[in-house]
Image (cartoon, helix red, strand yellow):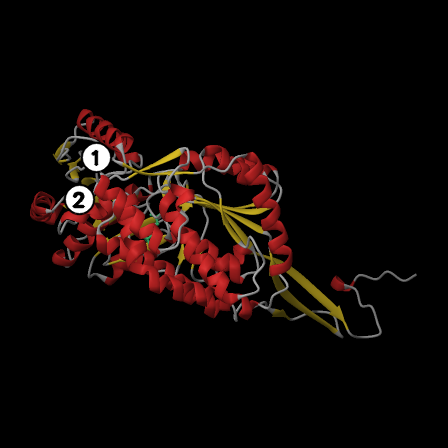
Amino acid sequence: MREMGQKIGRLLGGLGVDPALWADGSMPSVTPLTGEEVGRVRVADAAVIDERLERATAAFRSWRHVPPPRRGELVRLWGEELRAAKDDLAQLVTIEAGKIASEGAGEVQEMIDICDFAVGLSRQLYGLTIATERPGHRMMEQWHPLGVVGVISAFNFPVAVWAWNAALALVCGNSVVWKPSEKTPLTALAVQAIFDRAVARFGDAPEGLAQLLIGGREVGEALVDDPRVALVSATGSTRMGRAVAPRIAARFARAILELGGNNGAIVAPSADLDLALRGIAFGAMGTAGQRCTTTRRLFVHDSIYEGFVGRLKAAYASVAVGNPLEGEVLVGPLIDRAAFEAMEAALSAARAAGGVVFGGERVCEGASYYVKPALVEMPSQTGPVLEETFAPILYVMRYDDLDAAIGQHNAVGAGLSSAIFTRDLTEAERFLAASGSDCGIANVNLGTSGAEIGGAFGGEKETGGGRESGSDAWRAYMRRATNTINYSDALPLAQGVSFEI
Ligand code: UN1
């Protein structure tokens, strides 16, 4: 116990986090590696929330005047600080979220990548020049900063999701207020300290440009309801999204919602089965099944079913589960007891619906929750298969007709990520076509998880429709103004309307 506390203290101290912020507060931070408490953080009360939102509003008012490439310079410095802090921050992610070392490092790399992207973007916030029907006129679009951006993030990507939002929001001229998951406050404190170092080097950034609000549901609700917050970017369950979306809509604020995923993959007869096996193993078991992009449903063609599922089971049986600080494991712990109970409940429901469960056992007792990933052969897509359970459960089903399999694939509420493994071009294209996968992400010959930052990230239907990260996702963080300028002496009206006075 003492050892883990000391390690955390060393890491946070090295990253410049004031011990007063995490050592004697009221909210415990627990590591899923052992179930021990490793910190006690201070929680923002209503007065602190109000003060920070006031500061964020003032910061926005000044930051919006700073030229975008100069704003990009802050993000460039932030990326440098992240590079320097990568190993320590990755270890904190491992301790607080339970990720294996390479996934912890990968998550910090994702932050660095989005910083690089945002620096380039800071010179590319392009608007269009549009052909106008009126002589002596010019029509164009401008993209202006939006306001205070509220970010609500989940435990499973405790640092990268904030970075996707913050890096874009900042170059777009906004200020940011972040409510991290209650399960991962220490990584949030570390990230804030790293960001503050970049601000110090930058020199003249307004105070309160990016701030942290640690706390429970009430903090998230404050961001959702406060008229000072122009955009709420929320990552979490569909249930959470259903609760917050109408409240954000009621005050006509903007929302980016990244909600649940119930991601499916299809393995077609022509697939490279070695590659498919690896793609599915990482997608389904990686991060202990706790990514929103985790592969949860698998449709395998009848003609290859026995052999392929047999190989998959062998992979499930051999995968190393355990404490990522103590050895070469591929699957770390579930985040907490509630996650374990949800997994148990889903497996019972699957058995009741005729499923045959392989794996899924808890591998140690005590206050931590390590489980063998579960593969469940299902007679049909029913019961728990239709829901997202945030745990390593892969439901496997047979198919014989691709169109029917795509129909089944799309017959769930969520619409985040999807994949097909095939070497048949027509099958691949059918999966990617308008009548194919209905997800925001559709891949061929790679798994459902592990997207890179250059593409827009997000999904349809109950996933919420939001897009973050690359491509033109930045537009959600700005407001568009259409400007028409008349440089003639006449006033021709559009659509040929005549109005002579
Ligand atoms: C999430 O699980 O909330 O595509 C985000 C991926 C990661 C992001 C996941 N780049 O799996």
Q: Secondary structure at mark 2?
A: loop
Q: Determine whether, in the image, residue 438 is placed left or right of residue 95.
A: right
Location of residue 498 in the rendering, given as x and y in whole percent from the top left corner: 84, 62
Residue at which label 1 appears: 368
Q: State yes or no: discs 2 and 1 in contact (Cβ < 8 Å).
A: yes
The answer as to whether callout 2 falls within 8 Å of ligand 1 is: no
* In front of the other: 328 or 241: 328
Q: Quadrant of residue 42?
A: top left
Asked whether the viewer can see residue 59, the reply is yes
Q: In the image, what residue occupies the spot 66% across and 62% down?
A: 482
- Give amino acid for label 2: Asn
Mark 2 burial class by Cα count in 10 Å: few <14, some 14-19, many 20+: many
Helix, strand or loop at label 1? It is loop
Return the residue at label 2. Answer: 323
Residue 184 in the image: x percent, y percent?
Answer: 36, 42
Residue at the image point whose x is 36% and y is 48% from the top: 187
Q: Give above or below for 338 relative to 55.
A: above
Quadrant location, the C terminus: bottom right
